[in-house]
Image (spheres, grey):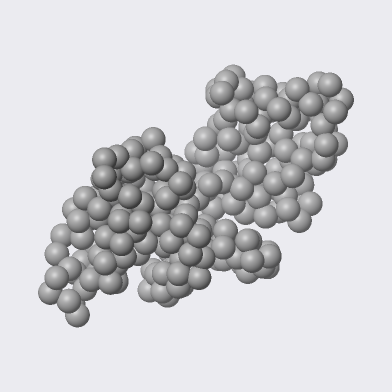
Amino acid sequence: MIPDLRSSTAAARARSLAARSVSAVALATLTGCAAMNPASQECVDPDRRLAQALAPIPPAHLDGPLCASAARGEVSCGMIRQRVNQLANLCPRHAPTVLAAASLAYDGGSISTAQQYLDDLLSWAPAYPEAVMLRSRLALQDGNLRLARRLLEQEIQRVPNHPGLREMLASLLYLQRQYAEARATLEIAGRLGAPGWRLSYNLGLVEEGLGNDEIAERHYAATLDARPDYGPARVRLEALRAGAAPRPRP
């Protein structure tokens, strides 16, 4: 149930880094971080340059793993990663570029590089939800649930109106089998504007964990009403109705 955050996650990346990362900067009141790096006279107009570097990625792929998607034309993911890394070196205080570099590294399997980018970014821009969510995901993959939860809870204190932080925290609570807390956290995420179809699916998982199969069925059905093509919800709903659903996994 953990949201896919690589684009801000994950790769908040220019058309969507210009729509997601840059908006995250605004959300976190970090607009000023888009200024030039004073140590380099080559850091000019980083927003435009980042958008250009990420332009070959089709918009449909901006919410998933960047380097698992096919780029348009002759530009490979490796080339996009190289260009973004070069820009990150020139503009190390341009938050969207550093986040894009971290996300591209993560999508490409370079976990330690992604962590280095994120740790540096969060050292001077701590109120940056998308960066915190990706860093929390790395901690989760490393099995460090305590660090992942601490990062999220601290960021919620800084940015309490960000629904994605609540969704990610709910996923951790779910992993720890704290189902009632996960449900309450998801309900807050919903009031803050989390996508309804995803909220319904995650609530379905939580209700299954609590043994409330009929309520879980209703949540999965609501997910499919909004997203008929969402396979995981259909699989779980059919299994529940057949009495063959295994215990849900995150």
Q: Position of residue 61 (x, y in %)?
A: 40, 40
Residue at the spot 28% in from the left edge and 48% down from the top edge: 75
Q: So how many labels did they put on this image?
A: 0
Residue 218 in the image: above or below residue 81: above
Q: Position of residue 30 (x, y in %)?
A: 32, 62
Residue at the spot 37% in from the left edge and 61% down from the top edge: 101
Along the viewing direction, whichever of 75 and 130 lies nearer the viewer = 75
Residue at the spot 82% in from the left edge and 31% down from the top edge: 245
Residue 43 in the image: above or below residue 15: below
Q: Residue pushed farthest bottom?
A: 39
The answer to whether residue 72 shows anywhere in this view is yes
The answer to whether residue 18 shows anywhere in this view is no
Q: Quadrant of residue 233?
A: top right
Q: Position of residue 88 (x, y in %)?
A: 29, 67
Identify the image quadrant of the N terminus. top right
Q: Position of residue 181 (x, y in %)?
A: 73, 50
Residue at the spot 57% in from the left edge and 38% down from the top edge: 190
Along the viewing direction, whichever of 41 and 221 lies nearer the viewer = 41
Residue 212 in the image: above or below residue 52: above
Q: Residue pushed farthest front?
A: 74
Along the viewing direction, whichever of 134 and 197 lies nearer the viewer = 134
Q: Quadrant of residue 215?
A: top right
Along the viewing direction, whichever of 182 and 136 lies nearer the viewer = 136
